[in-house]
Image (cartoon, rainbow, N blue to C red):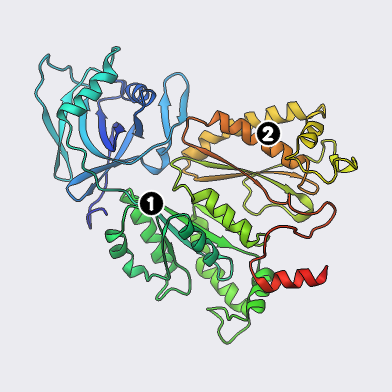
Amino acid sequence: MADEGAIPDTIHASAVARDGRAVLLLGPAGSGKSDLALRLVAAGWQLVADDRVVLTRVGDRLLASAPPRLAGLIEVRGLGIVPEPTHNAMVALALDLGRRPDRLPAADWIGWHGLPVPLLAFEPFGDSAVERVARALANAGLDGSTTPVQPILIVTGLSGAGKSTVLKALEDAGHEVVDNLPISLMDGLLAAAAPRPIALGLDSRTRAFDAKALAARVAALRDCARDVRLVYLDCADDVLIRRFSETRRRHPLALDRPAIDGIRAERDLLGGLKRSADLVIDSTELSVTDLRAIVTERFGGGFSPGLTVTLMSFGFAAGLPREADLVFDMRFLANPHWDAALRPLTGEDAAVAAFVEADPLYAGTLDRIDDLIRSLLPGYAREGKSYLTIAIGCTGGRHRSVAVARALAGRLAAHLANSGQTVALVHRDIAKQAGDAAVVAGAPLTDSAKAGEASSR
């Protein structure tokens, strides 16, 4: 963890890393920092930051990271700002691209936060530049000992929205899970924790819970270059009331009053956290299975360093997805539902996909949506957005939207294959029977609700 009271320095530089050891590329504008960083990335190095680097003291080492607004981006001359995943790393060497090196140079030193870093004058151009950086790191760089940067996931939100389900899914996915930890104990826990990802459950049930204090603690962790994400669980009031009634639990903020009073009070208490959350998950229409699948998809393999794009098919008959950032309507395409042979199938079946693709409007529409999404991705990444949900809708959410969402997901996955950004595909309503709103697969968030649905059919 960053030293108490240490204020990160932001310097004008670029940085790349190999095997967890970062090389700072220093020099005035036009000295070739971004160009050399791009060539090193092409040779298998990892980008830490381009143009600005945040330096934070961690014990007796310096941690290099990208400022939030520049994370996941690199400038390519002639192309502009393009996506490129960024990774934190400990500083091992600094190269000054603005000074002409001697033929047999001796290492100098430069320092931040009272810590010295070897410094070499360096010529960034020429075919051998990439190999010379590797040799400089091997010969003059600090050793490879590093302090691990632990991924931190903070899960909060409304009581009854599914936080326990999310924490259990994260534990199954390999996270160390701690629920209801007082905020005052966070620093001690994070200082002693192991490198594997940790998930903290914090909400209104937590002792001495203070939403503003939690938001300030998250901001402080980010300022210290900690890899922290805030996930907020939301749900519609009527569904929350039903869940509390079915489980016979009292709302933690309304022990002697109706549940709706506690729900409203909690919304007011947590409103600021929802606005600052990296990811908002609305569990109103989700089963336990659906919620676990979303969490596993997002965090089962750890944190993605870049933007995670989710293509979600849905049916307008069941309502718009609450988490959608962009929505596209496919109800103008020919509908396989009216073909008796295709009706029982879904857009995942080849016959349905072929039927949808045969519509004269399909190809041009897919091209235009694909172009639009690609043009927007750098902007979303530049603004520090971690998750982008693109919803593709049709009437029932089983045929046209499924086929189009899968096709778009394939295109975007190929486009982003080497960018560090990930693409997920979710079919919200594919399990619903044609012409019926009853969910066939997946248990609701309460067992009693499942029993009630079964008895009503």
User: Residue drawn at (45%, 18%), measured in percent from left and top?
Assistant: 78
Residue at the disc numbered 1: 151
Q: Quadrant of the N terminus?
A: bottom left
Instruction: Determine whether label 2 and label 1 are within 8 Å by CB.
Output: no
Figure quadrant of residue 47: top left
Q: Earlier in the sequence, mark 2 or mark 1?
A: 1
Q: Does residue 43 sit above or below 354 in this rendering?
A: above
162 or 209, which lies in front?
162
Q: Is residue 192 visible?
A: yes
Q: Is residue 49 visible?
A: no
Disc 2 secondary structure class: helix
Q: Does residue 316 sit above or below 307 in this rendering?
A: below
User: Residue drawn at (51%, 31%), measured in percent from left and top?
Assistant: 417
Badge number at residue 407? 2
Badge number at residue 411? none
Q: Does residue 155 sit above or below 278 in this rendering?
A: below
Q: Residues within 10 Å of mark 1 (few under 14, many from 20)?
A: some
Q: How many marks?
A: 2
357 relative position to 54: left or right:
right
Figure quadrant of residue 245: bottom right
288 or 230, which lies in front?
288
395 or 220, which lies in front?
395
Tell me where residue 283 appears, x and y as whole percent.
Answer: 62, 61
Cα–Cα gap, marks 2 and 1 = 32 Å
What is the three-letter code of the residue carrying label 1?
A: Pro
What is the three-letter code of the residue carrying label 2?
A: Ala
Figure quadrant of residue 115: top left
Disc 1 secondary structure class: loop
Tell me where residue 256 appears, x and y as whole percent.
Answer: 57, 87
Tell me where residue 26 appears, x and y as whole percent.
Answer: 24, 28
